[in-house]
Amino acid sequence: MIDWAAFLVVAVAALVSSAVVVSLYSLGLRLLTTAGRIPTVEPAEFTGALAVVTPARAAKNAKKARKASKANPLTAGQKRLAQYSGYLCFLLCGLIVLYGVYLIVPALHR
């Protein structure tokens, strides 16, 4: 017999936890860009890449990022707080994922 109440609890917990992880990750990215630490990815050099960014395009994007960071109205302390808060959001995401793995793998909590 299927315990539908337990199934519902697991489904709701999975939805809520995934929404929390995605929200924390998004907030972390937002805080890093606010602090002027824009996450970038180097151009892919292999043929299986979905999108290849040329060096000229990468330079243009870097110039836009420098220009945007100069227009940032935050003080140095506020930027540092935003940066550390972004890193804290990523740390919380990782801890939540590790806790989920801990709950799933029975050998870890015997």
Image (spheres, rainbow, N blue to C red):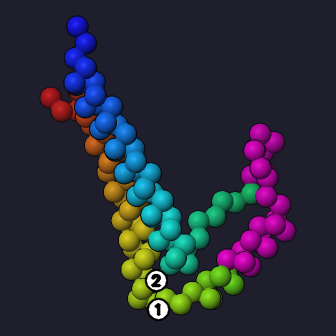
Q: Which mark, residue 79?
A: 2
Q: Is 55 included in the stretch rendered in magenta?
A: yes
Q: Is residue 77 visible?
A: yes
Quick check: marks 1 and 2 in contact, CB under 8 Å? yes
Residue at the spot x=72%, y=74% of the render? 62
Q: Is residue 101 visible?
A: no
Q: CA distance from mark 1 to mark 2?
A: 6 Å
Residue at the spot x=62%, y=88% of the render? 71
Local crowd size for mark 1, using a 10 Å CA cut-off: few (<14), some (14–19), many (≥20): few
Local crowd size for mark 2, using a 10 Å CA cut-off: few (<14), some (14–19), many (≥20): many
Percent x, y for residue 90?
41, 59
Q: Is residue 16 left or right of residue 3?
A: right
- Which stretch did the figure color magenta? 44-65
Q: Is residue 99 left or right of residue 20?
A: left
Percent x, y for residue 72?
57, 86
Disc 2 secondary structure class: helix
Amino acid beneath label 2: Lys
Amino acid beneath label 1: Thr
